[in-house]
Amino acid sequence: AKTIYLKDYKAPEFTVKTCDLVFELFEEYTQVTNLMQIVKMDKSAKDLVLDSVELELVEIHLNDVKLEEERYVVEKESLRVLDVEDEFKLIIINKIYPHRNSELEGLYKSGNIFCTQNEPEGFRRITPYIDRPDVMAVFKTTLVASREKYPVLLSNGNTESNFKLDDGRHGVTWSDPYPKPSYLFALVAGDLGVVKDKYITASGKYVRLNIYTDKGNESKCKHAMKSLKEAMQWDEEKYGREYDLSLYNIVAVDSFNMGAMENKGLNIFNSAYVLADEDTATDANFMGIQSVIAHEYFHNWTGNRITCRDWFQLTLKEGLTVFRDQCFSADLNSKEVQRIEDVKALRERQFVEDNSPMAHPIQPDSYMAINNFYTATVYEKGAEVIRMLHTLLGEQKYRKAMDLYFDTFDAQAVRTDDFLWAMSKAGEMNLEQFKRWYHQSGTPKLDVDEKFEDGTYTLTLIQKIPHAVDGSEQKPHFFPLKIGLLDESGKEILEKTLLISKEKEEFLFKTSFKPVLSINRDFSAPIIIDQKETHYGFLMKHDTNSFAKYEAAQLFGIQIIESLMQGNDINDEYVRAYGHILESDLDISYKALLLELPSISALMQRQNVVDFELIYDAIEKLQKHLASLYKEKLLEIYSKFHNPLCVDLDANSIGSRSIKNRCLKLLSSLKSNEMAVMANEQYSNSLTMTDKVAALDILENISSEYSAVAFKHFHDKYRQNTLVMNKYFSLLAASHREGTLERVIALQKDAAYNELVPNLVRSLVGTFTRNYKYFHAKDGSGYKFVADKIIDIDKINPQMASSLAGAFKIYKKLNVQNKKMMKVELERVVSTHSLSKNVYEIVSKIIK
Ligand code: HT7
Ligand code: ZN
């Protein structure tokens, strides 16, 4: 497969001014008529080269004359029109076969709905085009289809006209006044239900809001609609940005490769991020919907109005938009909980990626398959980089810089450097060194050394920057480091944001006593802190910074588990500090997070050679110890907050479910009948999906008898509801009970399972890859199963297959036995005949 390099970027030789499309949708095929006004930008260019993948060409007209075959060449993934003028009109008619499209890129069918996914390079699977984001055209789209089967016909922008044909077909013409790249083009055709609402913008403009879904699901769109209006208002208040069309459409479809897509005026969503009610969605699902709805809405300014020059700039829109959606969720819910959840997600996914052969900068400099670069690094680390800018500039200057960015680059396709120019200019800050965050990979480590002498407290910080994947050296970063100093009673004597730029930095503070350091408060930089002297128990009690307090609890937990792994006993100070949190009257959602023990992933990341058995045996030991020691208190909290009939979604109700389920989970480590009975009662009596899922998870792991009955009941009740069945598959794939792999294999035959639907594959196979116990079984059976699935699914959907292949990225860090087993499977996958470039890129990097 060919590697594409950023250094080879060339401005387009031609651009498309307008693109008028007609789609004639039939059951067997779709005919596309594409009329483009094209202008030559580089006068030395002779031929027009259009991207074109798997298209069946019917005919081409140049300036209204049908082209003879010798005037064009059909190449493997392009169409070359020979010797064209400076400005011309081109009409191309081609056929495509959406019902056969299982890759879910371009135009495809999700159930009975025609829909599109064009980011990053799907449009070339619809019609020949200059399919790159720096070619922006004004689109007009006419859809023609059976009136009975496809009464709803949607595209970007506003409806211009409707018409009926004599043969039972009808048509609608849409026009979008805003020039846009092809990746933002969308169409939908189906027999859909709709929920309608409206929004009046700050300047008084009336915007119609519609959410389309399969009929019967309309009542499940309330939360998505509420979230959309909240997002619209938030962007007006925080960024001064209003919506710019008079119509905003969202369509929910079941077969979708990712979460959602921000097509101009016509967002297409994975139904998992739209549909929810108390009976079928967990609290986490409701939060997820709020954040994804907001994320796609925010793209209207950061992504659509100002887009990327090329796909290497992806973090320009994704990192920024994730930062925006994180701030939105923090403002609407709990700031402290949101920050911790965001950092947790970053560490579980991005830190692991950054310490693997797949590590790359947030702005990569090369790729084989661009689809592989919609990564935690580009998105989540990208958001952390924007957050650091926000911290460095402060809210006011950041807002000024964002205004400058919008004013300067509106309607353009730009680079991350253009964004940084605006930040630097309005922020009045030199960001030359800061740019390294865009071009260097790996997670920086900061060695922290403290000294107290003669009334001076000295803090010495040394940056340890990892080498890049190719072994080359990387340079120190510039970042904000928020610290606090506490006296021995726990009183805060100082809070400060230090600016770190040199490899070694020294900071002196005059004090009459040696203070306790609280470092990287709020996780002000995405780095790993390596502290010689630690006071975790003290900080768990006294730290006033909610993130640092959580961090102390996690790091203390890690210290204890690692010491257990070395055969030592459990440290009493930790146990007391845990008890102190249990007794505290902190906010309950936050308290639930503080009570969470470190994850397997967090421990694994610290091992040079990973041995999972050692890790989960130690975690289990600690859980049991805490559960038996604090059993009464945990039971007391459980009964105080367990309210089975409450289905409310306010902070207190969500927090109550969160803390009591945390307590029950910890208690379940006792594996007693008493706990199984409690979980079983919760499963039977609770009305929310949150409580049911929490109970099922416990039952599955501690009692095969209760589990069998409860899962059967769950299956009988929800087997028609795919979104709920995702939870069913995922709970069973995560099970630590014996025979999990055999059950996962058998579940593929369940009537509700379908390998063509990515959500289901993610629930069953994807979850299994995170089941450390069975995916990493010493006999290699887990690896073999997943490798087989990658090979099978690659033939259907390469994007889905390569995301599963990412599970092998831990390869180099495995112990000898596991490594040997994984190697066999990696080699088998990479030598598979006609493997996609998506899977090839991932697997070949892992075994290199
Ligand atoms: N901008 C979108 C990225 C995307 C995507 C979405 C759905 C299916 C396939 C996709 N490939 C890339 C999603 C977002 O970040 O908002
Ligand atoms: Zn996005």
Image (spheres, helix red, strand yellow):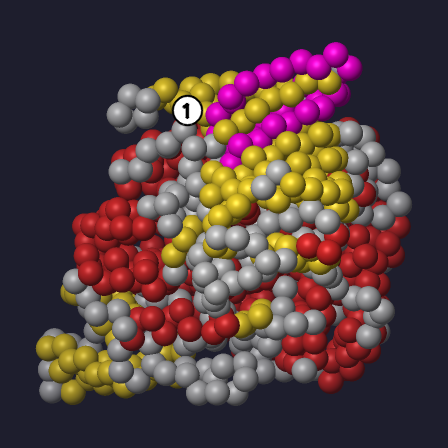
Q: Residues within 10 Å of mark 1 (few under 14, many from 20)?
A: some
Q: Which residues are magenta?
A: 139-167
The quadrant of the rendering that contains the N terminus is bottom right
**Residue 457 figure quarter:** bottom left
Residue at 71% across, 15% down: 165
| 127 shown above or below 716 | below
Kind of residue at badge 1: Ser
Residue at 39% across, 35% down: 231
> Can the viewer see residue 288 in this picture?
no
- The residue singled out by tag 1 in the image is 246
Q: Nearer the viewer, residue 382 or 545?
A: 382
Residue 409 in the image: x percent, y percent?
A: 32, 50
Residue at 42% across, 37% down: 178
The response on whether ligand 1 sits within 8 Å of label 1 is no
The quadrant of the rendering that contains the C terminus is bottom right
| 567 shown above or below 518 | below
Q: Is residue 217 left or right of residue 98?
A: left
By secondary structure, the bulk of the magenta-drawn segment is best described as: strand
**Residue 334 figure quarter:** top left
> Can the viewer see residue 162 in this picture?
yes
Residue 309 in the image: x percent, y percent?
A: 44, 57
State yes or no: residue 25 in magenta: no
